[in-house]
Image (cartoon, helix red, strand yellow):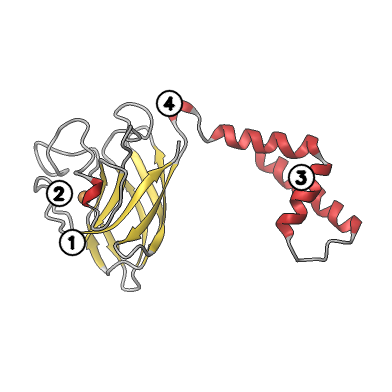
Amino acid sequence: MMMRGRWAFAAVTALAVGACGGDGGNQGGEMALDTTSTAVPAEGSPIDTSMAVTQPAGTTGGPATVVMRDASGRELGTLTATDTGQGISFAGMLRGLPPGEHGIHVHAVGQCQPPFESAGPHWNPTTMQHGTQNPQGPHMGDMPNLTVGQDSTVNVQVTTPGGSLHGQNAVMDADGAAVVIHASADDYRTDPSGNSGARIACGVLQGT
Ligand SMILES: [Cu+2]
């Protein structure tokens, strides 16, 4: 529905611009769209409002975004965090990481000052030990290792064993949360962080 509305609006806008014929082709497509939308108020503003409302959406939660950076501040890519009902999934492409296996966890504090100790320990609202193979585990922030290819990229698709962005055991609390990638693989059992070594990348969960 919404997409259809947007496409229809875009088509109308294109027609309008074409009809006026004075906006100089490719130059400033976004600007032209803004100018034209003021001439069609009934179409433009309601669409924008409904788009905004679907994102905050209260307790079931809209997605959060996580811009990952290494210790030099270089941006590696963006992950999208989504409530699945059985945990929080993180998805997205990252590049510029060392090839091989790396631990990746949700940490308890939304701060990423290198060397990323500022992100605190693993997110652990149920006060368990670390690791999905630990009889006393896991932390809610524990996730499967990433395998970064020889080209230094990885298609991230990982999910926490429980918790949520906004509902029960919400990660989006007063001090926020961060995703941290470690130098080594997580062994899934050694408390408190699976012997996964130094923190090489970090991103704060940002959203509603
Ligand atoms: Cu960690």
Q: Position of residue 52 (x, y in %)?
A: 59, 36
- SS assignment at label 1: loop
Tell me what residue is drawn at x 24 percent, y 54 percent.
116
**Between disc 4 and disc 2, whose residue precedes?**
4
Residue 51 seen in render:
yes
Tell me what residue is drawn at x 80 percent, y 66 percent.
25
Q: Residues within 10 Å of mark 2 (few under 14, many from 20)?
A: many
**Between disc 2 and disc 3, whose residue precedes?**
3
In the picture of the structure, the residue carrying the numbered disc 1 is 184
Q: CA distance from mark 1 to mark 3?
A: 49 Å
In the picture of the structure, the residue carrying the numbered disc 4 is 59
Ligand 1 is within 8 Å of the C-beta of the residue at disc 2: yes
In the picture of the structure, the residue carrying the numbered disc 3 is 9
Q: Position of residue 71 (x, y in %)?
A: 29, 62
**Between disc 4 and disc 1, whose residue precedes?**
4
Residue type at mark 2: give it.
Answer: Ser
**Between disc 2 and disc 1, whose residue precedes?**
1
